[in-house]
Image (cartoon, coloured by chain):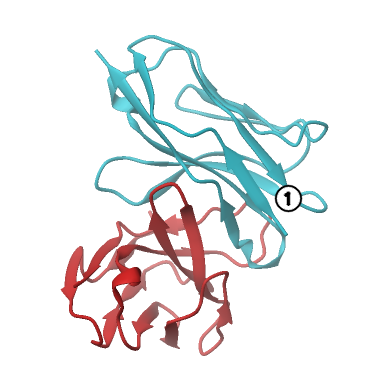
Chain colours: A red, B cyan
């Protein structure tokens, strides 16, 4: 089974802090994704990556950046955390460009910015 | 752009009741369609999928049929169990990179 592991289950940070969310997958998937989940809004794509050092903006990239130095690891960075970034963050991975290929999700990191 | 609309919850049912969650989509071309389920405290996991018109996806007693004429992918289960209590997300993917567009999610609560 594919395993996607997010390093923290819960995080509490202060406004203005730099925050790193880490995600590791063990199935050699090319594609990795960061979503945020908010009640009533479903999941919204922040950034995704097709390969090492490749990244593309999703629907809501403002205030975020990402890093993919190794194939198995995809990091989400909040350069200066703000209260409106309090949310559940979900990482996912998948095979590339195969119609119907599912995303495999981690269990999420619930971030609270105070 | 692409979008997915699903019925708002919460949906509260008794055990063994029939469940339907409506999902409609807007997209160009022929996307793949998915239902994901999120159990309490967990990430999302794929429930079922359909990759072309008239395909029926099924898993764990759930079914959904890809209806191109009505741009819909409604989820159904004939007899729900307490263990089906979860949040259900409808989603679509276009070809490039399997980026998913999600609906807002529907919370389902099944009472014994």
Q: Position of residue A20 (x, y in %)?
A: 28, 82
Above or below — where is B70 with respect to A72?
A: above
Chain of the residue under label 1: B
Q: Up-down: is B63 above or below B17?
A: below
Residue with the most extreme top position: B16
Q: Please tell me in which quadrant of the rendered image residue A86 appears.
A: bottom left
Q: Position of residue B66 (x, y in %)?
A: 71, 33
Left or right of B67? Residue A52 is: left
Q: Residue at x 34, y 52 (%)?
A: B43
Q: Nearer the viewer, residue A105 or A18?
A: A18
- The percent coordinates of residue B106 (x first, y second) are 45, 36
Quarter of the image that includes the C terminus of chain B: top left
Q: In the picture shown, does residue A102 fall above or below B39?
A: below
Identify the secondary structure beneath mark 1: loop
Give the vertical position of A67 relative to B47 (above or below): below
What residue is rendered at 54% in x and 22% in y?
B76
Mark 1 neighbour density, 10 Å: few (under 14) some (14–19) many (20 or more):
many
What residue do we see at 61% from left, 41% from top?
Answer: B5
Location of mark 1 (residue) = B31
Q: Position of residue A59 (x, y in %)?
A: 57, 69
Q: Which one is nearer the viewer's eye here, A59 or A47?
A: A59
Residue A31 as seen in the image, left or right of residue A114: right
Left or right of A19 on screen, residue A26: right
Query: How many numbered circles does the render carry?
Result: 1
Which part of the image, by quadrant, shows the N terminus of chain B?
Answer: bottom right
At horizontal 64% and vertical 44% (from top left) the residue drawn is: B33
């Amino acid at each position: 089974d594919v395993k996607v592991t997010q390093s923290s289950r819960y995080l509490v940070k202060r406004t203005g802090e730099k925050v790193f969310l880490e995600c590791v997958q063990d199935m050699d998937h090319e594609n990795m994704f960061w979503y945020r989940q908010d009640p009533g809004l479903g999941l919204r794509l922040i950034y995704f990556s097709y390969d090492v050092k490749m990244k593309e903006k999703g629907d809501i990239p403002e205030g975020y950046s990402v890093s993919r130095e190794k194939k198995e690891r995809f990091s989400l960075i909040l350069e200066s955390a703000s209260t409106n970034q309090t949310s559940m963050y979900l990482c996912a991975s998948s095979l590339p460009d195969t119609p119907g290929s599912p995303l495999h999700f981690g269990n999420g990191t619930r971030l609270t910015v105070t | 752009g692409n979008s997915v609309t699903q019925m708002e919850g919460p949906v509260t049912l008794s055990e063994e009741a029939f469940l339907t969650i409506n999902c409609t989509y807007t997209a160009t071309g022929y996307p793949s369609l998915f239902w994901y389920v999120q159990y309490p405290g967990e990430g999302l996991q794929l429930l079922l999928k359909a990759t072309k018109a008239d395909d029926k996806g099924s898993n764990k007693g759930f079914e959904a049929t890809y209806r191109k004429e009505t741009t819909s992918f409604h989820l159904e289960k004939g007899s729900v169990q307490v263990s089906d209590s979860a949040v259900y997300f409808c989603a679509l993917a276009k070809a490039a990179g399997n980026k998913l567009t999600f609906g807002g999610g529907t919370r389902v609560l099944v009472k014994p």
